Amino acid sequence: MSVLSSSTVSPSKASPAGAPNLGAPGLVAIAVLLLGTLLLGLVYGPIQGALFLVGGALGISLYHAAFGFTSAWRVFIAEGRGRGLRVQMVLLALAVILFFPALADGTLFGNPVKGSVSPAGLGVIVGAFMFGIGMQLGGGCASGTLFTAGGGNARMLVTLLFFVIGSVVATVHFDWWTSLPSLPPISLVQSFGAWGGIAVSLVIFAAIAGLTVIVERRRNGSLEQAPSSSRSGFGRVLRGPWPLVSGAVALALLNFATLALAGRPWGITSAFALWGAKGAQFVGFDPAAWAYWQTPANARALSESVFADVTSVMDFGLIAGAMLAASLAGRFAPSLDIPLRSILAAVAGGLLLGYGARIAYGCNIGAYFSGIASGSLHGYLWAVAAFAGNVLGVRLRPWFFLERRAPARIDG
């Protein structure tokens, strides 16, 4: 996620305390969530409808907590402020505590489940590094692109379009990337068991959090405190902003709900590749001839409606949920006044995000959050390579974003 100010109004212009003024966008979002859940449930089964609602809840949580991966990494790299990274460690700690016992057992509430565990190799390193650069140029990660676009950020629609294009282009070359040297899929759950894997994970998260504390104190003298909010009680729950930790708890619980319903953790970007392939078919290409789309699961997804695809349905729900949250907060105010260099950054960033996510077996959600929640070694490798890409991306940002701005903040 990135700063939302480019296309949203300030809190002072939001509707006054009390009953929120939803307006047309909020009413549309509610209608989409309710009707979408009903229709998906009738046509594709109740689980698909429930997953659409989970996607909506994810969009609300991401928006109200302003839960960002992009801005948190940028603030740490540029200013040494680590509050956002520490909350990410809380997110991952909660996730592994929830996930590992279920993954070790292989079932959750009587249903089979499996983690997002992928090979760790050169494709992951290169793809995650590209993704990291794209995060800073595009202005968001995978989840950030969706929820800020749903919240009314017009520039992020450009990032999303080229995210989709980059994703489908990567499927053309996917078999070449997978042929490069790599380690087989390795999981901490399989290597150490559920509780051993949890212990190892918590030590890693604590070490990273401790490192951010040391860096922040050395560079700034003290730790950043969470900003206060003029709202409290139910009004804050309904209209935000939520404390950042509350967002982490919500995301961990909703990812666990996804595991229970879908049988695997939350993902985002495989849907972008699917949407791009559908678009390629429409203009006359034959994605079915590409090796990526010849695996049984991908071939089936390509032949069916996007509404049969779990990831697509959750992405649609996420966008609708973010639109509802933005309306509740009084911040849904799209603007098409976007500087040319900012558009160029969105184009370049989107392409890097899409291509990088596909060859790295996922994005900040599918590889980093859900990968580490699954105990996958590739998730940790992804995080290191993506952070390095963010370092370069932060250095490139001044060329695209020439105006001087206040340091990026993580709301919550």
Image (cartoon, helix red, strand yellow):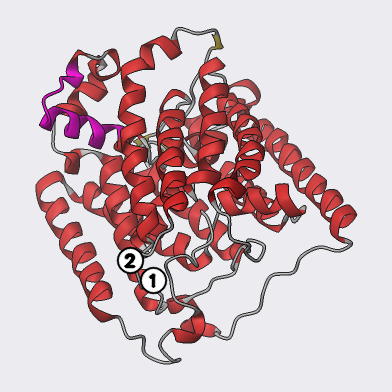
Residue 151 pos. (x, y %): 37, 64
Q: At label 2, which amino acid type do we have? A: Met
- Give the main secondary structure of the magenta stretch: helix
Residue at screen point 34% across, 55% down: 318
Crowd tier of the residue under label 1, counting other residues whose Cα lies within 10 Å: few below 14, some 14–19, many 20 or above:
many
Q: Nearer the viewer, residue 148 or 235?
A: 148
Q: Nearer the viewer, residue 193 or 245?
A: 245
SS state under label 2: helix
* Callout count: 2
Q: Is residue 286 rendered magenta in the image? A: yes
Residue 386 shows in the view: yes
Q: Is residue 187 visible?
A: no
Q: Tell me which residue sits at (23%, 38%) in the image.
A: 309
CA gap, disc 1 to disc 2? 5 Å
Quickly name the residue at label 2: 323
Q: Is residue 320 magenta?
A: no
Q: Which residues are magenta?
A: 273-288
Image: 66 above or below 391: below
| Residue 164 picture location, percent across and down | 32, 37
Tell me the residue at 22%/53% (across/down).
49
Q: Find out whether the residues at labels 1 and 2 contact each other: C-beta distance under 8 Å.
A: yes
On the image, the x and y values in percent for residue 228 come to 65, 79
Q: Nearer the viewer, residue 162 or 101?
A: 162
In this rendering, the answer to whether 72 lies above or below 244 is above
Q: Position of residue 299 (x, y in %)?
A: 20, 22
